[in-house]
Image (tube, rainbow, N blue to C red):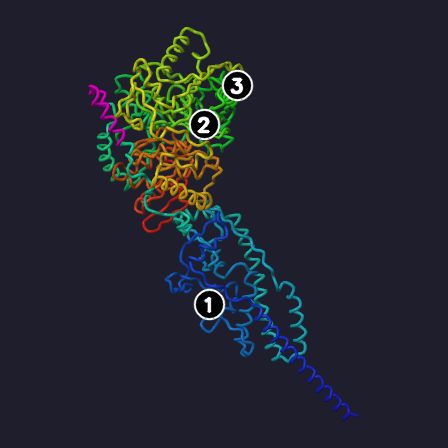
Amino acid sequence: MAFGNKHGRQDKHSSNTLCFRGTVVIFVGVCVLAVWMLNSSSPAPVERKTFSNIRKINPDPEIPEKTGDSPPEETKENTSDGSVSFEDSPGDLPDDAIKGDDNNPQVEQKTDIDKTSDDEKQTDGDQGLHEEKKSDLGKTFDEEKQSDGEPGSNEEKKSDGDGNSDVGKSFDGNVNLKEENPTDGFENNDKGGQKVIEEATDKMTDGDKSKEKKDVENSLQSEKDGDKYKEEKEKNQSEQRSNGNQEVEEKKVEDNKLPETLPNAGQFELQKENTVVPGNWETQAAESKDERERQESSIVANPEEKKEEPATGQVEDGGNKKEQSNQVVSNSYNWQLCNVTAGPDYIPCLDNVEAIKKLTSTKHFEHRERHCPQEPPTCLVPLPPGYKLPVHWSESRDKVWYNNVPHTKLAEVKKHQNWMKVEGEHVIFPGGGTQFKNGALHYIDFIEETIPDVAWGKHSRVILDVGCGVASFGGFLFDKDVLTMSLAPKDEHEAQVQFALERGIPAISAVMGTKRLPFPSAAFDIVHCARCRVPWHADGGRLLLELNRLLRPGGYFVWSATPVYQNKDEDVDIWKAMSSLTASICWDLLAKKSDGFNEVGVAIYRKPTTNNCYESRRTNEPPLCAEADDPYAAWYVPMESCLHRVPTDEERGTEWPEEWPQRLEKVPFWLKGDLHDRFISETEHWKRIVSKSYLQGLGIDWSAVRNVMDMKTVYGGFAAALASQPVWVMNVVPTDTKNTLPVIYDRGLFGIHHDWCESFSTYPRTYDLLHADHLFSGLVKRCSLVAVMAEVDRILRPGGYVIIRDKVDTLNEMENMIRSLQWDIRLTYTQEMEGILCAQKTMWRP
C-alpha cells in the first residue's frame, strides 16, 4: 500500500511537470509572438530634415519659423549639401532602456525576431515600445531636460534667439504651447498584462520565473514610464502656461539676445536699395534749390532775409558738425530728457525759441513756420504724467485719454461749437466744428448735395483741410472712403493737430505763411476751408495762389466762412475782394448755398482745366508765373504772387485720375515705357512682402496700429498694400531722393516732402508704425544717426513699431541704438549684407 502510494505520487508529479513545461512553452511562444507584433507595428524612424525643410513646413503662418542655439554636437550630421540635419532624439525612454553597447540612444535598432540574448530582447522590446509610444509621450527626453533649463535637440521644436526652445513661442514673449491629443494604444493593456505575469509566475520555477518575468516586465516598463512622463509633461505645460510670460521676459532681460526669426528670405525679398525710380527725375532738394536761386536772381534780395532762410549751405555745414557730434554720442548713447519749455509737446523745428526771437517780422506768420536748430537735438522728449497707450481706432475718433493730451483751452473756447469736451479720464469729440456745430456728417452730405460731381470717395479722394481744428471733418470723411490731409499751425488754439493725430486722423503742423507748403503741384482733388481764418485776399492773393498751385485742374475749393453768408461790413468787403480775386484766376463759382441745419453757408469754386481763360484776361493780374518757375519745387521755397499755368500736351494734370478704388492700381497715364513697368513692379513687390510677412510674421498687433508713416517711399507701394487695413499712411519722399510724390497723389494716396536731417512737423507720440526702406544708410554722410533716432523716438508712440530695411552695417548701428533705448527687438534677419529689423517702443525714459 505504501509502495503503491509512492508510485502514485511520482506519476502525479511527473504529470504536473509535463503540464507545467507545456504551459511554459506556450507562454514563451505567446511572449515571442507579442514581441514580434510590437516590433512589427512600431513606426519607421522619423525622416531627417534639414534646416531648409523645417522652414518650409511651418504649420502656423502667424508664428514664423525660428532658429536658436545649435543642438548638442552628437545630434548634428553634415549632409552632402553642407546643411545640417538632426537625428531622432531618444525620447522618453527609461534609463535602462537607453543602455546600448555604446550608450548611444541614436543607434538604429533592428527588429529581428530571431534574437535570443536577453540584452537584444530588452533593447528591441523597449525600442519598439518607444517608437509605438512616441506620439503618446509628446515630449522627448531632451525636451524634458529643456523644461529644467537644458536645451533640447528635437527637430520639431522651434527656438527663439534667447536660447529657449519652447514650441510655438510668439514674438511678444508669450509661450503658446501646442496641446497634443495622443492616441494611447496601450491604455487598456496594463491590467491584462499584469494578470498574465501573475498567472505565469505561479506555474514557473524560480529561475524560469525570474527570466520570463524580467522579459515581460521590461517589455511593459516603457508603457508605465510613458504614463509617468505624460503626467510630468502635463504638469510642466501647466507650469509653463502660468509662468511663461514672466520667465520669457526675465530671459530676455538676462540674455538680451537678438531673436533670429523667419529665415525664409523670400518672405522679405531682401534686396539692395530699391531701384524702381525714374532715373531722369530730379530730387526735391535740387528742384527747390534751383527755384530759390531763380527767384533770388529776379529780385534784389535783402541780406537780412537771406540769413533767415535755411539755405542748403547751412544744412551742409550743420552736417559736418553733426558727424562730429555723432562720434561722441554714438559711443555712449547717453540719452537724456529734453529740457525745453514745450516739455512733452516739443517740436524742434517749431519751438526753436532762439530763432523765433531773431525774426524781424511776424506779419506773415513767420513765427509759425519751420525754424530748425542747426544742431538737431539728440535728447528724448518726456512723457506727459499719466500717459496711457492710445485708444484704438475707430473708438479713438470719438474719445481719447485726457492725460495723453491734457489741454482744455479748446474745450473752453469752442464749447458752444461742439469741438470737444472733457468727461472724466477722457476727452470726448461730439463731431462738431465751427461751421458744423451739429455734426460733420450732415455738413459733408450737404456739400455733396450742393455739387453732386464732388462724389465723395469716387471722384474726390484726396482732400486738404486748411485750418482743420481737431479734424472732425477729415475724421468723418473716412466713412466716405476719403483721405484728408488736415493742416493747422501750432498756435494759441493749442494742440489742434495733436488732438487730431491722437484720434487717428491724418494731420501736420503747418501754416499758410511765406513758404510753399511741402506738397507737389496739382496734388489735391479738393481744398477745404471752414472759417480757417486765412486772409486769402491779402498780399495780392498770394495765399490763394498757393492753393491754386496745390489744386488739381478741375478740382474744387470749398469755402464756408462768415463772408459767404453774413452781411456785416467786414464780411461784405471780404466777399467782394474774394469774388474779384477768384474771377481773376479763372475759378468758377459753382454754388453759394446756405445750410439751414448748421446755420452756415458754403461757396464752392472749380479750377479751370485749360489755359484759355488765363490768356483771354484783360489784364495780367495776378501775373502768370515765369516759364522757368517750377511748381513742383516746395522745400523752403518762398511763395510768389503769380499764377501757375495748367499743364498741357498730355502732361501730368491734363486728365483726372480714375475713380477710386480703381485709381489705386491704375498706372498714371503719363508714366510711359519703363516707368510704367517700374510702377507695376514696385506695387507687386510690396504686396507680396506685406501679405506674406508684415501682416503675419512680425508679431505686430495690427489692431493697435492706425497712424503709419513710410519714411522713404517711391511710388507708394507699401501704402497701397495696406489699403485694405483700417490704417492711413503718410508717404514721405525725402528731399534727397527722386521726386516721385506726384505719382502717389495720382493713385489716391497722400504724402509730403521732408529732409530727415531735420525734425518732422508733428507732435511727439503721433505715429503707431514707422517703416524705413534703406533710409538711414543714405543719411550717414549728411547727418547724425543718433539725432535721427531721437526723432524716430519722438514721433513714435509708446507701444508703436518700427520696421527698418537696410544694409547690415547700418542695421547693426540702428539696433545698438534701439537696444540702448530699451525697446523690444521683435525680429532681425540678414542675408547677403542686407537685413530687416522690427522693434517695439516701450515706456522707458532716462
Q: Identity of the amino acid at label 3?
A: Asn
Which residue is the site of mark 3? Answer: 438
Q: Secondary structure at mark 3?
A: loop
- Report the magenta stretch's main SS: helix
Residue 785: % across, % down: 30, 38
Q: Give the vertical position of 636 relative to 800 (above or below).
A: above
Residue 298 on the magenta span: yes
Q: Earlier in the sequence, mark 2 or mark 1?
A: 1
Q: Identity of the amino acid at label 1?
A: Gln
Label 2 and label 1: CA atoms lie apart by 69 Å
Answer left or right for 503 relative to 643.
right
Residue 316: % across, % down: 23, 33
* Residue 106 marker: 1
Answer left or right for 589 relative to 371.
right
Q: Nearer the viewer, mark 3 or mark 2?
A: 2
Which residue is the site of mark 2? Answer: 460
Q: Identity of the amino acid at label 2?
A: Ser
Q: Which residues are magenta?
A: 286-307
Answer left or right for 808 relative to 702.
left
